[in-house]
Amino acid sequence: MKKIATLIAEKMSEAFAACGYDSSYGMVTVSNRPDLCQYQCNGAMAAAKAYRKAPIVIAGEVVKALGEQPMLAAAEAVAPGFINITLKPEFLTDYVFEMGRTERFGVEQPAKPKTVVIDYGGANVAKPLHVGHMRPAIIGESVKRILRYTGNKVIGDAHLGDWGTPIGLIITELKVRQPDLVYFDPDYTGEYPKEPPFDVSELEEIYPYASKWSKEHEDYRAESRKAILELQQGRRGYMALWEHIMRVSMEDVKKSYDKLGTQFDIWGKESDAQKHIPGMIRDMKDNGYAYISDGALVVDVKEETDTKEVPPCMILKSDGATLYNTTDLATIVERMKLFDPDQIIYVVDKRQNLYFEQIFRCARKTKLVKPDTELTFIGNGTMNGKDGKPFKTREGGVMRLEVLIENVAEEVMRKMADRDIPEQEKREIAYKVGLAALKYGDLSNQATKDYIFDMERFTSFEGNTGPYILYTMVRIKSILAKLGQLPEMTTKAAARERGADEVNLLLSLARFADCVEKAASELAPHRICQFIYELADEFNGFYHANKIVGETDEAKRSEWITILRITLAVLSDCIGMLGMEAPDRM
Ligand code: ARG
Protein backbone atom coordinates (compact mmCIF):
# COMPACT_ATOMS: atom_id res chain seq x y z
CA MET A 1 0.00 0.00 0.00
CA LYS A 2 1.44 3.35 -0.98
CA LYS A 3 1.88 6.07 1.58
CA ILE A 4 -0.59 8.89 1.30
CA ALA A 5 2.13 11.49 0.72
CA THR A 6 3.41 9.31 -2.13
CA LEU A 7 -0.01 9.17 -3.76
CA ILE A 8 -0.29 12.95 -3.69
CA ALA A 9 3.30 13.41 -4.85
CA GLU A 10 2.67 11.18 -7.86
CA LYS A 11 -0.10 13.46 -9.04
CA MET A 12 1.97 16.57 -8.38
CA SER A 13 4.96 15.10 -10.25
CA GLU A 14 2.79 14.38 -13.28
CA ALA A 15 1.61 17.98 -13.25
CA PHE A 16 5.17 19.36 -12.97
CA ALA A 17 6.21 17.14 -15.88
CA ALA A 18 3.19 18.20 -17.95
CA CYS A 19 4.35 21.82 -17.57
CA GLY A 20 7.85 20.91 -18.72
CA TYR A 21 9.53 20.81 -15.30
CA ASP A 22 11.41 17.97 -13.74
CA SER A 23 8.99 15.61 -12.01
CA SER A 24 11.16 15.48 -8.87
CA TYR A 25 9.70 18.83 -7.82
CA GLY A 26 6.44 17.10 -7.01
CA MET A 27 7.44 16.04 -3.49
CA VAL A 28 4.92 16.88 -0.78
CA THR A 29 5.14 17.19 2.98
CA VAL A 30 2.65 17.45 5.79
CA SER A 31 1.55 21.07 5.96
CA ASN A 32 3.14 23.26 8.57
CA ARG A 33 0.05 25.45 8.43
CA PRO A 34 -2.71 22.95 9.22
CA ASP A 35 -5.13 25.87 9.47
CA LEU A 36 -4.68 26.44 5.73
CA CYS A 37 -4.21 23.00 4.22
CA GLN A 38 -3.27 19.38 4.94
CA TYR A 39 -0.26 18.85 2.69
CA GLN A 40 2.02 21.22 0.86
CA CYS A 41 4.34 21.10 -2.12
CA ASN A 42 7.30 23.47 -2.11
CA GLY A 43 8.64 22.28 -5.47
CA ALA A 44 7.86 25.50 -7.33
CA MET A 45 10.21 27.37 -4.98
CA ALA A 46 13.09 25.07 -5.89
CA ALA A 47 12.15 24.92 -9.59
CA ALA A 48 12.16 28.73 -9.71
CA LYS A 49 15.94 28.77 -9.28
CA ALA A 50 16.56 26.07 -11.88
CA TYR A 51 14.20 27.52 -14.50
CA ARG A 52 14.71 31.22 -13.67
CA LYS A 53 11.02 31.93 -13.31
CA ALA A 54 8.94 33.41 -10.51
CA PRO A 55 7.88 30.57 -8.15
CA ILE A 56 4.28 31.75 -8.03
CA VAL A 57 4.10 31.52 -11.83
CA ILE A 58 5.32 27.92 -11.76
CA ALA A 59 2.97 27.05 -8.91
CA GLY A 60 0.07 28.55 -10.88
CA GLU A 61 0.91 26.52 -13.98
CA VAL A 62 1.19 23.31 -12.02
CA VAL A 63 -2.12 23.80 -10.25
CA LYS A 64 -3.77 24.45 -13.61
CA ALA A 65 -2.21 21.29 -15.10
CA LEU A 66 -3.39 19.32 -12.09
CA GLY A 67 -7.01 20.15 -12.94
CA GLU A 68 -9.69 18.11 -11.22
CA GLN A 69 -8.36 15.13 -9.25
CA PRO A 70 -10.57 12.57 -7.54
CA MET A 71 -8.38 12.71 -4.43
CA LEU A 72 -8.14 16.48 -4.13
CA ALA A 73 -10.65 18.88 -2.66
CA ALA A 74 -8.34 21.81 -3.36
CA ALA A 75 -4.89 22.65 -4.68
CA GLU A 76 -4.00 26.29 -4.50
CA ALA A 77 -0.97 28.33 -5.53
CA VAL A 78 -0.16 30.86 -2.81
CA ALA A 79 2.55 33.52 -2.57
CA PRO A 80 5.45 33.29 -2.76
CA GLY A 81 5.05 29.93 -4.53
CA PHE A 82 3.69 27.21 -2.30
CA ILE A 83 1.02 24.78 -3.39
CA ASN A 84 -1.49 24.13 -0.62
CA ILE A 85 -3.25 20.81 -0.82
CA THR A 86 -6.44 19.57 0.78
CA LEU A 87 -7.74 16.04 0.29
CA LYS A 88 -11.31 14.97 -0.36
CA PRO A 89 -12.75 13.53 2.88
CA GLU A 90 -14.10 10.50 0.94
CA PHE A 91 -10.66 9.78 -0.45
CA LEU A 92 -9.14 10.02 3.02
CA THR A 93 -11.84 7.77 4.44
CA ASP A 94 -11.32 5.14 1.73
CA TYR A 95 -7.58 5.31 2.32
CA VAL A 96 -8.01 4.65 6.04
CA PHE A 97 -10.50 1.83 5.34
CA GLU A 98 -7.94 0.24 3.06
CA MET A 99 -5.29 0.60 5.78
CA GLY A 100 -7.64 -1.31 8.04
CA ARG A 101 -7.66 -4.23 5.58
CA THR A 102 -3.90 -4.18 4.96
CA GLU A 103 -1.36 -6.01 7.00
CA ARG A 104 0.43 -3.67 9.39
CA PHE A 105 -1.79 -0.85 8.20
CA GLY A 106 0.30 -0.27 5.14
CA VAL A 107 3.81 -0.40 6.61
CA GLU A 108 5.76 -1.99 3.76
CA GLN A 109 8.11 -4.90 4.33
CA PRO A 110 11.64 -4.24 3.06
CA ALA A 111 12.79 -5.91 -0.16
CA LYS A 112 15.85 -7.15 1.68
CA PRO A 113 15.27 -7.50 5.43
CA LYS A 114 18.29 -6.77 7.60
CA THR A 115 19.66 -9.03 10.28
CA VAL A 116 20.29 -6.87 13.31
CA VAL A 117 21.82 -7.71 16.68
CA ILE A 118 20.86 -5.29 19.39
CA ASP A 119 22.85 -5.14 22.61
CA TYR A 120 20.72 -3.37 25.21
CA GLY A 121 21.04 -5.13 28.56
CA GLY A 122 24.40 -4.59 30.13
CA ALA A 123 23.35 -5.19 33.73
CA ASN A 124 26.18 -6.46 35.87
CA VAL A 125 25.78 -9.68 37.78
CA ALA A 126 26.08 -9.50 41.56
CA LYS A 127 24.45 -6.07 41.47
CA PRO A 128 20.71 -5.55 41.55
CA LEU A 129 19.25 -4.04 38.41
CA HIS A 130 19.10 -0.33 39.13
CA VAL A 131 17.72 2.68 37.33
CA GLY A 132 21.01 3.25 35.48
CA HIS A 133 20.33 0.17 33.39
CA MET A 134 16.68 1.02 32.86
CA ARG A 135 17.00 3.37 29.91
CA PRO A 136 18.93 0.98 27.62
CA ALA A 137 16.41 -1.75 28.49
CA ILE A 138 13.41 0.42 27.65
CA ILE A 139 14.86 2.10 24.56
CA GLY A 140 16.47 -1.05 23.21
CA GLU A 141 13.32 -3.09 23.63
CA SER A 142 11.39 -0.50 21.67
CA VAL A 143 14.00 -0.19 18.90
CA LYS A 144 13.96 -3.98 18.61
CA ARG A 145 10.19 -4.06 18.25
CA ILE A 146 10.12 -1.19 15.74
CA LEU A 147 12.73 -2.91 13.57
CA ARG A 148 10.79 -6.15 13.76
CA TYR A 149 7.55 -4.46 12.87
CA THR A 150 9.23 -3.04 9.79
CA GLY A 151 10.21 -6.52 8.70
CA ASN A 152 13.75 -7.07 9.92
CA LYS A 153 15.24 -10.03 11.73
CA VAL A 154 16.33 -8.74 15.10
CA ILE A 155 18.20 -10.55 17.86
CA GLY A 156 18.11 -8.88 21.25
CA ASP A 157 21.10 -9.68 23.44
CA ALA A 158 21.32 -9.01 27.19
CA HIS A 159 25.13 -8.95 27.19
CA LEU A 160 25.41 -9.11 30.97
CA GLY A 161 28.57 -7.94 32.68
CA ASP A 162 29.88 -11.08 34.37
CA TRP A 163 33.61 -10.99 33.87
CA GLY A 164 35.30 -7.77 34.88
CA THR A 165 36.27 -5.88 38.00
CA PRO A 166 33.15 -6.70 40.08
CA ILE A 167 33.89 -10.42 40.03
CA GLY A 168 37.48 -9.78 41.15
CA LEU A 169 36.22 -7.67 44.02
CA ILE A 170 33.69 -10.25 45.16
CA ILE A 171 36.28 -13.02 45.16
CA THR A 172 38.69 -10.82 47.11
CA GLU A 173 36.10 -9.87 49.70
CA LEU A 174 34.92 -13.44 50.11
CA LYS A 175 38.48 -14.45 50.80
CA VAL A 176 38.71 -11.84 53.54
CA ARG A 177 35.45 -12.98 55.12
CA GLN A 178 35.75 -16.73 54.71
CA PRO A 179 39.42 -17.52 54.05
CA ASP A 180 38.91 -21.19 54.85
CA LEU A 181 36.54 -21.83 51.95
CA VAL A 182 37.84 -24.65 49.81
CA TYR A 183 37.74 -22.40 46.72
CA PHE A 184 40.78 -20.55 47.99
CA ASP A 185 42.92 -23.65 48.56
CA PRO A 186 45.22 -23.85 45.50
CA ASP A 187 46.08 -27.49 46.23
CA TYR A 188 42.49 -28.68 46.33
CA THR A 189 41.72 -31.08 43.48
CA GLY A 190 38.35 -32.51 44.54
CA GLU A 191 34.87 -31.47 43.54
CA TYR A 192 33.52 -28.14 44.75
CA PRO A 193 30.29 -27.92 46.73
CA LYS A 194 27.06 -27.62 44.76
CA GLU A 195 25.62 -25.09 47.21
CA PRO A 196 26.91 -21.53 46.86
CA PRO A 197 28.60 -20.02 49.93
CA PHE A 198 26.24 -17.01 49.79
CA ASP A 199 22.70 -16.06 48.82
CA VAL A 200 21.59 -13.22 46.60
CA SER A 201 21.15 -10.66 49.35
CA GLU A 202 24.63 -11.39 50.72
CA LEU A 203 26.02 -11.06 47.23
CA GLU A 204 24.36 -7.71 46.77
CA GLU A 205 25.79 -6.54 50.07
CA ILE A 206 29.32 -7.78 49.32
CA TYR A 207 29.82 -6.00 46.02
CA PRO A 208 29.15 -2.38 47.01
CA TYR A 209 31.10 -2.93 50.20
CA ALA A 210 34.12 -4.30 48.32
CA SER A 211 33.86 -1.62 45.69
CA LYS A 212 33.99 1.12 48.29
CA TRP A 213 36.78 -0.53 50.23
CA SER A 214 38.90 -0.96 47.09
CA LYS A 215 38.73 2.74 46.32
CA GLU A 216 40.49 3.47 49.60
CA HIS A 217 42.94 0.56 49.68
CA GLU A 218 45.54 0.03 46.97
CA ASP A 219 46.63 -3.42 48.22
CA TYR A 220 43.01 -4.62 48.10
CA ARG A 221 42.69 -3.31 44.56
CA ALA A 222 45.86 -5.15 43.54
CA GLU A 223 44.54 -8.29 45.17
CA SER A 224 41.32 -8.00 43.19
CA ARG A 225 43.14 -7.45 39.90
CA LYS A 226 45.16 -10.56 40.61
CA ALA A 227 41.96 -12.51 41.26
CA ILE A 228 40.55 -11.41 37.91
CA LEU A 229 43.73 -12.37 36.09
CA GLU A 230 43.71 -15.78 37.76
CA LEU A 231 40.07 -16.25 36.90
CA GLN A 232 40.82 -15.38 33.28
CA GLN A 233 43.64 -17.91 33.35
CA GLY A 234 41.17 -20.50 34.55
CA ARG A 235 42.05 -21.04 38.23
CA ARG A 236 39.68 -23.85 39.24
CA GLY A 237 38.47 -22.56 42.58
CA TYR A 238 37.76 -19.14 41.16
CA MET A 239 35.92 -20.56 38.20
CA ALA A 240 33.74 -22.52 40.62
CA LEU A 241 33.08 -19.39 42.67
CA TRP A 242 32.28 -17.43 39.55
CA GLU A 243 29.76 -20.07 38.53
CA HIS A 244 28.07 -19.74 41.91
CA ILE A 245 27.96 -15.96 41.56
CA MET A 246 26.47 -16.35 38.11
CA ARG A 247 23.79 -18.82 39.06
CA VAL A 248 22.68 -16.90 42.11
CA SER A 249 22.49 -13.51 40.48
CA MET A 250 21.46 -14.40 36.94
CA GLU A 251 18.14 -15.58 38.28
CA ASP A 252 17.67 -12.28 40.06
CA VAL A 253 18.68 -10.19 37.04
CA LYS A 254 16.34 -12.17 34.79
CA LYS A 255 13.47 -11.63 37.19
CA SER A 256 14.07 -7.88 37.20
CA TYR A 257 14.19 -7.59 33.42
CA ASP A 258 11.06 -9.67 33.32
CA LYS A 259 9.26 -7.27 35.64
CA LEU A 260 10.17 -4.46 33.28
CA GLY A 261 8.86 -6.47 30.32
CA THR A 262 12.23 -6.60 28.59
CA GLN A 263 12.50 -9.75 26.50
CA PHE A 264 15.94 -10.77 25.34
CA ASP A 265 16.30 -13.44 22.70
CA ILE A 266 19.67 -14.43 24.04
CA TRP A 267 21.10 -13.96 27.49
CA GLY A 268 24.65 -13.34 26.34
CA LYS A 269 27.34 -12.57 28.88
CA GLU A 270 30.73 -10.94 28.60
CA SER A 271 32.36 -14.25 29.50
CA ASP A 272 30.83 -15.96 26.46
CA ALA A 273 33.29 -14.19 24.20
CA GLN A 274 36.40 -15.32 26.08
CA LYS A 275 36.90 -18.28 23.79
CA HIS A 276 37.40 -15.97 20.82
CA ILE A 277 40.05 -13.81 22.47
CA PRO A 278 43.24 -15.83 21.77
CA GLY A 279 42.46 -16.23 18.06
CA MET A 280 41.44 -12.60 17.71
CA ILE A 281 44.64 -11.38 19.34
CA ARG A 282 46.74 -13.67 17.17
CA ASP A 283 45.14 -12.23 14.03
CA MET A 284 45.55 -8.67 15.22
CA LYS A 285 49.24 -9.29 15.85
CA ASP A 286 49.87 -11.30 12.68
CA ASN A 287 48.28 -8.66 10.50
CA GLY A 288 50.32 -5.92 12.11
CA TYR A 289 47.38 -4.08 13.66
CA ALA A 290 48.33 -4.58 17.29
CA TYR A 291 51.62 -3.61 18.86
CA ILE A 292 53.18 -3.35 22.32
CA SER A 293 53.18 0.06 23.93
CA ASP A 294 54.39 0.47 27.53
CA GLY A 295 53.98 -3.27 27.94
CA ALA A 296 50.32 -3.25 26.88
CA LEU A 297 48.98 -4.54 23.56
CA VAL A 298 47.18 -1.77 21.67
CA VAL A 299 45.66 -0.92 18.28
CA ASP A 300 45.85 2.66 17.01
CA VAL A 301 42.47 4.00 16.05
CA LYS A 302 42.99 7.72 15.57
CA GLU A 303 42.11 9.23 12.24
CA GLU A 304 43.40 12.31 10.43
CA THR A 305 40.09 14.07 10.55
CA ASP A 306 39.76 13.74 14.35
CA THR A 307 39.18 16.98 16.14
CA LYS A 308 39.43 15.34 19.54
CA GLU A 309 42.06 12.97 20.85
CA VAL A 310 41.05 9.34 20.23
CA PRO A 311 43.40 7.17 22.29
CA PRO A 312 44.56 3.74 21.08
CA CYS A 313 42.31 0.79 21.85
CA MET A 314 43.91 -1.36 24.53
CA ILE A 315 43.61 -5.10 23.94
CA LEU A 316 45.74 -6.55 26.75
CA LYS A 317 47.05 -4.93 29.91
CA SER A 318 50.76 -5.22 30.67
CA ASP A 319 50.08 -8.10 33.06
CA GLY A 320 48.29 -9.93 30.22
CA ALA A 321 44.79 -9.39 31.61
CA THR A 322 41.97 -8.70 29.17
CA LEU A 323 39.71 -5.67 29.49
CA TYR A 324 36.16 -4.49 28.83
CA ASN A 325 37.41 -3.56 25.32
CA THR A 326 38.81 -7.00 24.66
CA THR A 327 35.51 -8.59 25.56
CA ASP A 328 33.47 -6.23 23.39
CA LEU A 329 35.71 -6.89 20.39
CA ALA A 330 35.60 -10.65 20.92
CA THR A 331 31.82 -10.40 21.25
CA ILE A 332 31.75 -8.85 17.78
CA VAL A 333 33.71 -11.87 16.53
CA GLU A 334 31.16 -14.16 18.14
CA ARG A 335 28.16 -12.26 16.76
CA MET A 336 29.58 -12.29 13.25
CA LYS A 337 30.08 -16.06 13.54
CA LEU A 338 26.63 -16.76 14.96
CA PHE A 339 24.41 -14.33 13.07
CA ASP A 340 26.42 -12.64 10.32
CA PRO A 341 24.46 -9.43 11.03
CA ASP A 342 24.11 -6.44 8.72
CA GLN A 343 24.04 -4.20 11.74
CA ILE A 344 24.94 -4.31 15.42
CA ILE A 345 23.26 -1.70 17.58
CA TYR A 346 24.41 -0.86 21.11
CA VAL A 347 22.12 0.98 23.47
CA VAL A 348 24.36 2.13 26.30
CA ASP A 349 24.79 5.23 28.46
CA LYS A 350 26.10 8.05 26.26
CA ARG A 351 29.08 8.52 28.56
CA GLN A 352 30.52 5.44 26.81
CA ASN A 353 30.46 7.26 23.48
CA LEU A 354 34.22 7.63 23.02
CA TYR A 355 34.73 4.06 24.14
CA PHE A 356 32.40 2.73 21.45
CA GLU A 357 34.04 5.00 18.87
CA GLN A 358 37.32 3.23 19.68
CA ILE A 359 35.70 -0.21 19.56
CA PHE A 360 34.00 0.44 16.22
CA ARG A 361 37.14 1.81 14.63
CA CYS A 362 39.20 -1.05 15.97
CA ALA A 363 36.68 -3.65 14.76
CA ARG A 364 36.71 -2.10 11.29
CA LYS A 365 40.43 -1.65 11.07
CA THR A 366 41.17 -5.20 12.20
CA LYS A 367 38.40 -6.51 9.92
CA LEU A 368 36.32 -8.20 12.59
CA VAL A 369 33.26 -7.10 10.62
CA LYS A 370 32.38 -7.08 6.93
CA PRO A 371 32.91 -3.68 5.29
CA ASP A 372 29.15 -3.16 5.03
CA THR A 373 28.25 -4.24 8.55
CA GLU A 374 26.92 -1.17 10.29
CA LEU A 375 27.99 -0.53 13.87
CA THR A 376 25.62 1.84 15.59
CA PHE A 377 25.79 3.43 19.00
CA ILE A 378 22.64 4.80 20.60
CA GLY A 379 23.99 6.67 23.60
CA ASN A 380 21.20 7.29 26.05
CA GLY A 381 21.05 10.29 28.33
CA THR A 382 20.40 9.97 32.06
CA MET A 383 17.17 9.95 33.95
CA ASN A 384 17.60 12.72 36.48
CA GLY A 385 15.85 13.66 39.69
CA LYS A 386 14.17 17.02 40.20
CA ASP A 387 17.58 18.42 41.24
CA GLY A 388 18.85 17.77 37.71
CA LYS A 389 21.33 15.12 38.90
CA PRO A 390 21.14 11.37 38.18
CA PHE A 391 18.09 9.95 39.92
CA LYS A 392 18.76 8.73 43.46
CA THR A 393 16.80 7.37 46.40
CA ARG A 394 15.83 9.80 49.11
CA GLU A 395 18.87 8.56 51.06
CA GLY A 396 21.11 9.31 48.09
CA GLY A 397 21.74 5.70 46.99
CA VAL A 398 21.02 4.06 43.65
CA MET A 399 17.44 2.89 43.39
CA ARG A 400 16.60 -0.67 42.54
CA LEU A 401 14.56 -0.79 39.40
CA GLU A 402 11.86 -2.89 41.05
CA VAL A 403 11.42 -0.30 43.77
CA LEU A 404 11.00 2.44 41.20
CA ILE A 405 8.39 0.42 39.30
CA GLU A 406 6.53 -0.32 42.57
CA ASN A 407 6.53 3.37 43.49
CA VAL A 408 5.07 4.37 40.16
CA ALA A 409 2.43 1.63 40.36
CA GLU A 410 1.53 2.87 43.87
CA GLU A 411 1.01 6.37 42.55
CA VAL A 412 -1.28 5.07 39.78
CA MET A 413 -3.13 3.08 42.45
CA ARG A 414 -3.76 6.33 44.34
CA LYS A 415 -5.03 7.97 41.15
CA MET A 416 -7.49 5.11 40.71
CA ALA A 417 -8.67 5.19 44.34
CA ASP A 418 -12.26 6.08 43.45
CA ARG A 419 -12.63 3.34 40.81
CA ASP A 420 -15.01 0.55 41.55
CA ILE A 421 -12.67 -2.30 40.59
CA PRO A 422 -11.79 -5.30 42.80
CA GLU A 423 -8.53 -4.70 44.68
CA GLN A 424 -6.49 -7.47 43.04
CA GLU A 425 -7.48 -6.48 39.51
CA LYS A 426 -6.85 -2.86 40.34
CA ARG A 427 -3.30 -3.70 41.42
CA GLU A 428 -2.65 -5.51 38.17
CA ILE A 429 -4.00 -2.60 36.18
CA ALA A 430 -1.95 -0.12 38.20
CA TYR A 431 1.17 -2.15 37.50
CA LYS A 432 0.56 -2.12 33.74
CA VAL A 433 -0.32 1.55 33.73
CA GLY A 434 2.63 2.39 35.98
CA LEU A 435 5.04 0.59 33.68
CA ALA A 436 3.56 2.41 30.71
CA ALA A 437 3.92 5.72 32.57
CA LEU A 438 7.59 5.00 33.20
CA LYS A 439 8.29 3.78 29.67
CA TYR A 440 6.39 6.53 27.91
CA GLY A 441 8.03 9.14 30.14
CA ASP A 442 11.33 7.74 28.97
CA LEU A 443 10.62 7.05 25.31
CA SER A 444 8.84 10.29 24.55
CA ASN A 445 12.20 12.00 25.00
CA GLN A 446 14.87 11.66 22.38
CA ALA A 447 17.13 8.84 23.59
CA THR A 448 20.26 10.99 23.76
CA LYS A 449 18.66 13.67 25.92
CA ASP A 450 18.64 13.64 29.71
CA TYR A 451 15.23 14.01 31.28
CA ILE A 452 13.73 14.57 34.68
CA PHE A 453 11.71 11.84 36.33
CA ASP A 454 8.50 13.56 37.32
CA MET A 455 6.18 11.15 39.11
CA GLU A 456 3.23 13.53 39.07
CA ARG A 457 3.44 14.30 35.38
CA PHE A 458 4.34 10.78 34.17
CA THR A 459 1.38 9.20 35.94
CA SER A 460 -1.15 11.85 34.98
CA PHE A 461 -4.13 10.58 32.98
CA GLU A 462 -4.03 13.77 30.94
CA GLY A 463 -1.41 15.32 28.69
CA ASN A 464 1.47 13.70 26.84
CA THR A 465 1.73 10.61 29.05
CA GLY A 466 1.52 6.84 28.87
CA PRO A 467 -1.63 6.69 31.01
CA TYR A 468 -3.36 9.19 28.71
CA ILE A 469 -2.69 6.97 25.70
CA LEU A 470 -3.91 3.88 27.55
CA TYR A 471 -6.94 5.75 28.80
CA THR A 472 -7.83 6.66 25.23
CA MET A 473 -7.58 3.01 24.24
CA VAL A 474 -9.72 1.95 27.18
CA ARG A 475 -12.28 4.55 26.14
CA ILE A 476 -12.47 3.09 22.62
CA LYS A 477 -12.71 -0.43 24.01
CA SER A 478 -15.58 0.58 26.23
CA ILE A 479 -17.48 2.27 23.37
CA LEU A 480 -17.05 -0.83 21.25
CA ALA A 481 -18.20 -3.01 24.13
CA LYS A 482 -21.35 -0.91 24.49
CA LEU A 483 -22.18 -1.57 20.84
CA GLY A 484 -22.35 -5.29 21.45
CA GLN A 485 -22.13 -7.34 18.25
CA LEU A 486 -20.02 -5.24 15.87
CA PRO A 487 -21.11 -4.84 12.22
CA GLU A 488 -18.83 -5.72 9.29
CA MET A 489 -16.02 -3.21 8.67
CA THR A 490 -17.14 -0.58 6.15
CA THR A 491 -15.08 -0.63 2.97
CA LYS A 492 -16.38 2.35 1.01
CA ALA A 493 -16.92 5.93 2.12
CA ALA A 494 -20.49 7.22 1.81
CA ALA A 495 -21.06 10.62 0.20
CA ARG A 496 -21.84 12.77 3.23
CA GLU A 497 -20.68 15.79 5.17
CA ARG A 498 -17.75 15.12 7.49
CA GLY A 499 -16.81 17.39 10.36
CA ALA A 500 -13.29 18.79 10.89
CA ASP A 501 -12.81 16.55 13.94
CA GLU A 502 -13.49 13.46 11.85
CA VAL A 503 -11.22 14.58 9.01
CA ASN A 504 -8.41 15.35 11.46
CA LEU A 505 -8.67 11.91 12.98
CA LEU A 506 -8.51 10.31 9.53
CA LEU A 507 -5.52 12.45 8.55
CA SER A 508 -3.70 11.46 11.66
CA LEU A 509 -4.38 7.74 11.06
CA ALA A 510 -3.28 8.03 7.44
CA ARG A 511 0.20 9.11 8.55
CA PHE A 512 0.89 5.89 10.43
CA ALA A 513 3.16 4.20 7.88
CA ASP A 514 5.16 7.36 7.35
CA CYS A 515 5.77 7.71 11.03
CA VAL A 516 6.74 4.08 11.63
CA GLU A 517 9.18 4.11 8.74
CA LYS A 518 10.79 7.26 10.11
CA ALA A 519 11.00 5.76 13.58
CA ALA A 520 12.71 2.71 12.09
CA SER A 521 15.19 4.56 9.92
CA GLU A 522 16.12 6.96 12.70
CA LEU A 523 15.95 4.27 15.42
CA ALA A 524 13.75 6.73 17.25
CA PRO A 525 10.89 5.49 19.46
CA HIS A 526 10.03 9.09 20.36
CA ARG A 527 8.57 9.40 16.85
CA ILE A 528 5.99 6.75 17.73
CA CYS A 529 5.19 8.62 20.94
CA GLN A 530 4.66 11.86 19.02
CA PHE A 531 2.39 10.05 16.60
CA ILE A 532 0.19 8.38 19.21
CA TYR A 533 -0.10 11.51 21.27
CA GLU A 534 -1.44 13.33 18.23
CA LEU A 535 -3.67 10.44 17.28
CA ALA A 536 -5.06 10.12 20.80
CA ASP A 537 -5.75 13.85 20.87
CA GLU A 538 -7.52 13.74 17.52
CA PHE A 539 -9.54 10.78 18.63
CA ASN A 540 -10.62 12.50 21.83
CA GLY A 541 -11.58 15.62 19.85
CA PHE A 542 -13.73 13.45 17.61
CA TYR A 543 -15.21 11.62 20.58
CA HIS A 544 -16.26 14.81 22.34
CA ALA A 545 -17.75 16.31 19.17
CA ASN A 546 -19.95 13.34 18.28
CA LYS A 547 -22.44 10.99 19.89
CA ILE A 548 -21.00 7.80 18.54
CA VAL A 549 -23.14 5.18 20.27
CA GLY A 550 -26.38 7.12 19.87
CA GLU A 551 -25.89 7.97 16.17
CA THR A 552 -28.99 7.05 14.15
CA ASP A 553 -27.66 7.66 10.61
CA GLU A 554 -26.69 4.12 9.59
CA ALA A 555 -23.94 5.09 7.11
CA LYS A 556 -22.32 7.42 9.61
CA ARG A 557 -22.60 4.96 12.44
CA SER A 558 -21.00 2.09 10.60
CA GLU A 559 -18.19 4.27 9.26
CA TRP A 560 -17.50 5.59 12.73
CA ILE A 561 -17.39 2.14 14.23
CA THR A 562 -14.90 1.12 11.53
CA ILE A 563 -12.77 4.19 12.23
CA LEU A 564 -12.85 3.42 15.95
CA ARG A 565 -11.71 -0.12 15.40
CA ILE A 566 -8.87 0.98 13.16
CA THR A 567 -7.82 3.67 15.64
CA LEU A 568 -7.73 1.14 18.44
CA ALA A 569 -5.75 -1.36 16.37
CA VAL A 570 -3.23 1.26 15.27
CA LEU A 571 -2.78 2.52 18.83
CA SER A 572 -2.40 -1.03 19.99
CA ASP A 573 0.36 -1.80 17.46
CA CYS A 574 2.07 1.45 18.44
CA ILE A 575 2.12 0.79 22.14
CA GLY A 576 3.32 -2.72 21.29
CA MET A 577 6.29 -1.12 19.57
CA LEU A 578 6.95 0.87 22.72
CA GLY A 579 6.79 -2.24 24.91
CA MET A 580 3.62 -1.08 26.68
CA GLU A 581 0.43 -3.02 27.38
CA ALA A 582 -3.10 -1.67 27.73
CA PRO A 583 -5.57 -2.91 30.35
CA ASP A 584 -9.25 -3.43 29.48
CA ARG A 585 -10.32 -0.79 31.96
CA MET A 586 -8.65 1.69 34.26
N1 ARG B 1 27.97 -3.72 31.78
C1 ARG B 1 28.26 -2.45 31.21
C2 ARG B 1 28.11 -1.35 32.24
O1 ARG B 1 27.42 -1.52 33.23
C3 ARG B 1 27.39 -2.10 30.04
C4 ARG B 1 27.54 -3.01 28.85
C5 ARG B 1 27.09 -2.38 27.58
N2 ARG B 1 27.29 -3.20 26.41
C6 ARG B 1 28.46 -3.45 25.84
N3 ARG B 1 28.50 -4.23 24.81
N4 ARG B 1 29.57 -2.93 26.31
O2 ARG B 1 28.68 -0.28 32.06
Image (cartoon, grey):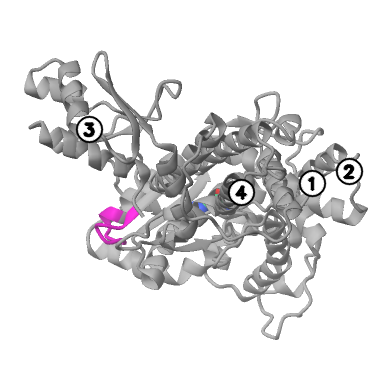
Q: In this view, does 527 lie to the left or right of 192?
A: left
Of the image marks 4 and 3, the number of the one nearer the N terminus: 3
Query: Mark 1 or 2 closer to N-term?
Result: 2
Q: How far separated are the C-alphas under marks 4 and 3?
A: 34 Å
Q: Mark 3 points at which residue?
A: 67
Q: Which mark is residue 586?
A: 1
Please state which amino acid type lies under the numbered disc 2.
Answer: Arg
> The disc labelled 1 sits on which kind of residue?
Met
Q: Is mark 4 on a helix, strand or loop?
A: helix
Query: Quick one: label 2, few (<14), some, or many (20+) residues within 10 Å?
Result: few
Q: Nearer the viewer, mark 4 or mark 2?
A: 4
Q: Can residue 217 be seen in this view?
A: no
Q: What stretch is highlighted in magenta?
A: 364-374
Residue 245 visible in the displayed image: yes
Spot occupied by residue 243 in the image (x, y as percentages of width and height): 66, 72
Q: In this view, does 282 lie to the left or right of 467?
A: left
Q: Mark 4 points at which residue?
A: 554
Q: How crowded is mark 4: few (under 14 residues within 10 Å), some or many (20 or more)?
A: few
Q: Which secondary structure lies at badge 2? A: loop
The residue at which mark 2 appears reads as: 419
For the N terminus, the image quarter is: bottom left
Q: How far apart are marks 1 and 4 (CA)?
A: 31 Å
532 to 424, vertically: above or below: above
Residue at 89% across, 56% down: 424
